[in-house]
Amino acid sequence: MTQRRSPDPVQVVKQRRDAALRALVQGVPYIRFLGISFDRRGDELTANLAFDEKLIGNPMLPAIHGGVTAAFLEVTAIIELSWSMLWQDVESRKIDVDTLEAGHLPRLPKTIDFTVDYLRSGLPRDAYARARVNRSGRRYASVHVEAWQDNRDRLFAQGTGHFLMPPRDG
């Protein structure tokens, strides 16, 4: 008869989850360049694009560059997909957080296509986004992302993407 291991204290579980997310995000230099961070509440992620002058595309308005907006949405979708894959492995301890922090990250999903709807100009302030995985299978995933600034009900952009999922080990 095997003895069942007692669950970890809540703080240890939170630290393990936060460390795994931090390793995932810090493993992509472009995310760091744009200044995107992620806030985790349970398994829900909110992306934060911190305002910086380098993000302005049209200084006459001023407005966030359309390419930055698209990249913000796509990065949010990819991290959400990766986090949903990683979540189970981190929870079951199939993946060691120290391994992730050492730079041994799982392969990220590859974009097949990504469509952006620009609903209004992105103002010179912080922006937020959340992604919802519509379908995720072994080979393919579909994700919808919404971005806002001051009011969650007043989106400035949204996107839908299709992704090729990396092979799962085991």
Image (cartoon, helix red, strand yellow):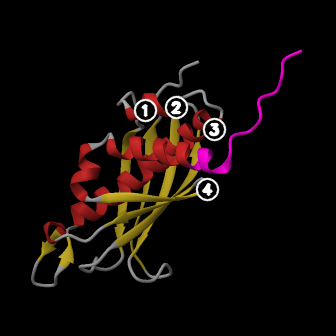
**Of callouts 4 and 2, the N-terminal one:** 4
Quadrant of the image occupied by residue 94: top right
Give the CA separation, mark 4 to mark 2. 26 Å
Give the CA separation, mark 3 to mark 4. 12 Å
Label 1, on which residue? 100
Asked if the residue under mark 2 is in contact with the one under mark 4, i.e. CB atoms within 8 Å, the reply is no
Residue extending farthest to the left is 60
**Of callouts 2 and 3, the N-terminal one:** 3
Give the CA separation, mark 2 to mark 3. 23 Å
Q: Residue at x 50, y 81 (%)?
A: 153
Q: Is residue 108 above or below residue 4?
A: below
Q: Quadrant of the N terminus?
A: top right
Label 2, on which residue? 139
Looking at the rendered structure, the secondary structure element under dot 4 is loop
**Kind of residue at badge 3:** Glu
Circle 4 or circle 2, nearest the eye: 4
Q: Residue at x 38, y 78 (%)?
A: 149
Residue closest to the eye, 105 or 155: 105
Decide whether residue 8 is among the magenta residues: yes
Label 3, on which residue? 91
Quadrant of the image occupied by residue 103: top left
Residue 122: x and y in percent read 28, 76
**Kind of residue at badge 1:** Leu
**Range of residues picked out in magenta:** 1-14
Decide whether residue 132 is among the magenta residues: no
Quadrant of the image occupied by residue 23: top left
Label 4, on which residue? 42
Asked if the residue under mark 3 is in contact with the one under mark 2, i.e. CB atoms within 8 Å, the reply is no
